[in-house]
Each structure stands twice: as C-alpha cells, then as structure tokens.
C-alpha cells in the first residue's frame, strides 16, 4: 500500500493526512468554497479541523494571499460552522 497523501495546514503549518484536513477551493470563476469531498475543481488550500488554526488563518490573512483575492466573512463563518459542528 502506498503512502497516504499529506497536506500542510495553512493555520499551523503542520503536515497531516489529507483526509484529516478541510479543503478550501477557489474555482476558475473565482468562487471560494469548502470542499468536503476533496474532488472540486480549482486551487485548493487545507486547514486543520480546529478553531485555533482557523483563527490564525483569519488573523494572518493567509488564505487571501494564497488565493490572491478578498475572502468574505461569510466564508470564514461557514468554516467556523464546519469546524464547530463536529
């Protein structure tokens, strides 16, 4: 069996298996979505499933730098809901 794919969390910079992280994706139209399946088309960024990483991501505006676009509070609130809704 091959190695599990790992991704880096944009909040804490820790490497974790892809399945344990939440994927945020920007598609060709510039829309930002939360991708639970890991199969959506577009540029992906990953974050741990915990609120500390999300707060760090918001504070540093790292997601905006990665996607080169303004991220609405609505997206952050959706992420917060996904994380807190475990």
Image (spheres, grey):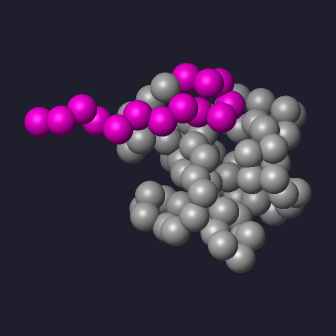
> Residue 86's x, y, as percent?
52, 47
- The relative height of residue 25 versus residue 84 in the rendered view (above or below) is below
The reply to whether residue 20 is in sight is: no
Q: Quadrant of residue 56?
A: top right
Farthest bottom residue? 29
Say left or right for 50 vs 1.
Answer: right
Q: Quadrant of residue 51?
A: top right
Farthest left residue? 1
Say left or right for 57 vs 26.
Answer: right
- The relative height of residue 29 versus residue 13 in the rendered view (above or below) is below
Which residue is located at x 81 percent, y 62 percent? Answer: 74
> Residue 16's x, y, as percent?
44, 29
Please check the rendered image and state whether residue 68 is part of the magenta-colored stretch, yes or no.
Answer: no
- The relative height of residue 86 versus residue 35 in the rendered view (above or below) is above
The reply to whether residue 78 is in sight is: yes
Quadrant of the snapshot with the N terminus: top left
> Residue 22's x, y, as percent?
54, 47
Which residue is located at x 88 percent, y 57 percent? Answer: 70
Which residue is located at x 65 percent, y 24 percent? Answer: 12
Magenta: main secondary structure: loop
Q: Nearer the viewer, residue 82 or 66?
A: 66
Q: How many marks?
A: 0
> Residue 23's x, y, as percent?
55, 51
Q: Nearer the viewer, residue 42 or 84?
A: 42
Q: Which residues are magenta?
A: 1-14
Which residue is located at x 58 percent, y 53 percent? Answer: 44
Say left or right for 47 vs 69.
Answer: left
């Amino acid at each position: 069996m091959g190695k599990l794919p790992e991704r880096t969390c944009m909040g804490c910079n820790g490497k974790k298996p892809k399945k344990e992280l939440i994927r945020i994706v920007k598609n060709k139209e510039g829309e930002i979505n939360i991708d639970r399946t890991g199969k959506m088309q577009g540029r992906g960024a990953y974050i741990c499933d915990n609120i500390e990483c999300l707060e760090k991501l918001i504070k540093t505006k790292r997601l905006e730098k990665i996607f080169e676009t303004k991220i609405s509070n609505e997206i952050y609130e959706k992420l917060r809901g996904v994380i807190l809704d475990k």
